[in-house]
Image (tube, rainbow, N blue to C red):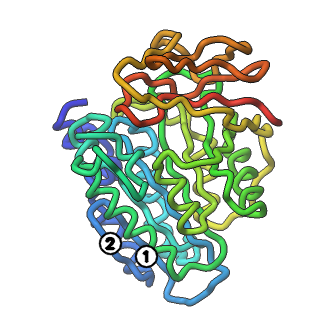
Amino acid sequence: MTADATQSGGLPPAVQALAQADFGAVAQLFADAGFAVALPAPGMLQVKSHSADLNRPSVVLSVGVHGDETGPIEVLAHLLDALSRDVSTQPHALAVDLLVCVGNVDAIRAGKRFIDADLNRMFRPVRGSLAQAAESARADDMIAATSAFFGDAGPVRWHLDLHTAIRPSFYPTFAIVPDLVEEGAKAALIAWLGQAAIGAIIMNPQSAGTYSYYSAEHCGAAASTVELGRVGTLGQNDLSLFDDVAQALDGLLRGLPQQAVKAAPHVFKVAQEIIKHSDEFRMAFDRGTHNFTSLPQHAVIASDGDTVYTVQHAEELVVFPNPDVRVGLRAGLMVVRVA
C-alpha cells in the first residue's frame, strides 16, 4: 500500500473515511439520533447515551494500532456505517457506550506498520529510547482518551484491540488476554471470543506495553488483543474471513444475546518471554516460522551473547517471534497449553 492508498477512489466510502480517521458522517448520524458525541482526539470517536445508566456497558474498539493491519479497519468501517444508519430510526440499536480508536493514523496513511517505532509498545510509564518516537505522543493521546472514557463508566467494561498478524499461524485467529482481568469479566470475554470463532487464547501475566494490557490494568477493562488472520492491503482483504468476528462485534454493540460458542478456544499461558538484550540476538529458527510452532524440551529458542534461551517444559510453542525488534523489547513469547 502506498502513501496515497487511503485516497483511492476504489475503496468503499465508509472504509476510506475510517482509514483517514474521518468520523464526520457517522458522528453526525449518532448525534442526530440523540447520543452525546465527542471527538476526544484525532482518529477517535466517542458515542455515549445521555442517560446515567451504570448498567450500560462501555466498549472500546481499536484498529490500526499497526498501520499495515487493515482487515479490522474494513470490518469496523462497515459495522459503524450500518449501525449509525440504524440508530436514526432505532436509537436503541446501539446498546453500549462506545469509544472507537483508529490507532496509528499516520502509519495507515503511509501504508507502513509504524513511523518511528511500534505503537503497541508505548503504553508503559517508562519508554526509554522510545520516548522521542512519533508514536509516543500518539500513545499519550490514546491513554488520555481511554482513561477519560472509562472514568465514569459502570462495571461492564470491554476493550477489543483488533489486529492481524505478520506471519502465518497454526491458529489463524487467536487472542491475548491479560491474566489480571477479573474472573467474571474474563469468563464473559472468553465466551465472546469463542462466539467470534477465535481459535486460541493466551493468558498473559505481564504487560509488554500494549494498549489492551493498559486498559485492563489501569481502567479495569476486560481487554484483549485479538489477532484476526494475516496482514493485507486496504481494500483487498477477503472480508468473508472476518464473518464470525464481525457478527460477534455487531451483537456486542447492539446488546444481542450471545450465540452458542462454535468451538471452545484452546487456552495457553505464557511460559517465558524472549527479550532482545543486544544486537547479538539471534533466533534459532527462520523468519518463515509459524506462530504456535511447537518446540521440544531443551531446544534452543534464541541466543543473545552469553544468554541462551531454551525450552523449559516438555513442549512450548513460539508466538510473535521477531528478531528485528529494538533492543530491550520482547522478541517472542513461549506458551504452553493449559486447556
Which residue lies under the disc numbered 1?
148
Please state if 169 lies on the left or on the right of 38 as rendered.
right
Q: Residue at x 62, y 79 (%)?
A: 154
Instruction: From the viewer's side, name the closer residue of 326 and 152.
Output: 326
* Disc assigned to residue 239: none
Instruction: From the viewer's side, name the closer residue of 194 and 317.
Output: 317
Instruction: From the viewer's side, name the closer residue of 170 and 306.
Output: 306
Q: CA distance from mark 2 to mark 1?
A: 9 Å
Quarter containing the C terminus: top right
Dot placed on the residue nearer the N-terminal end, 2 or 1 = 2
The image shows residue 181 at horizontal and vertical percentages of: 67, 59
Q: Residue at x 73, y 29 (%)?
A: 336
Locate residue 137: give its quadrant: bottom left
Instruction: From the viewer's side, name the closer residue of 129 and 57.
Output: 129
The local crowd at label 1, few if under 14, some if 14 to 19, many if 20 or more residues have their Cα within 10 Å, is few
- Amino acid type, residue under disc 1 in the picture: Ala
Q: Secondary structure at mark 1?
A: helix
Locate residue 108: give its quadrant: top left
Q: Residue furthest front?
A: 306
Please state if 186 lies on the left or on the right of 331 as rendered.
right
The image shows residue 70 at horizontal and vertical percentages of: 39, 38
* Disc assigned to residue 40: 2
Proximity of marks 2 and 1: CB atoms separated by less than 8 Å: yes
Locate residue 202: give its quadrant: top right
Q: Residue at x 51, y 21 (%)?
A: 307
Vertical arrangement, residue 82 with respect to residue 288, above or below: below
- Amino acid type, residue under disc 2 in the picture: Pro
Vertical arrangement, residue 45 with respect to residue 224, above or below: below
Q: Secondary structure at mark 2?
A: loop
Vertical arrangement, residue 168 with respect to residue 136, above or below: above
The local crowd at label 2, few if under 14, some if 14 to 19, many if 20 or more residues have their Cα within 10 Å, is some
The image shows residue 294 at horizontal and vertical percentages of: 68, 16
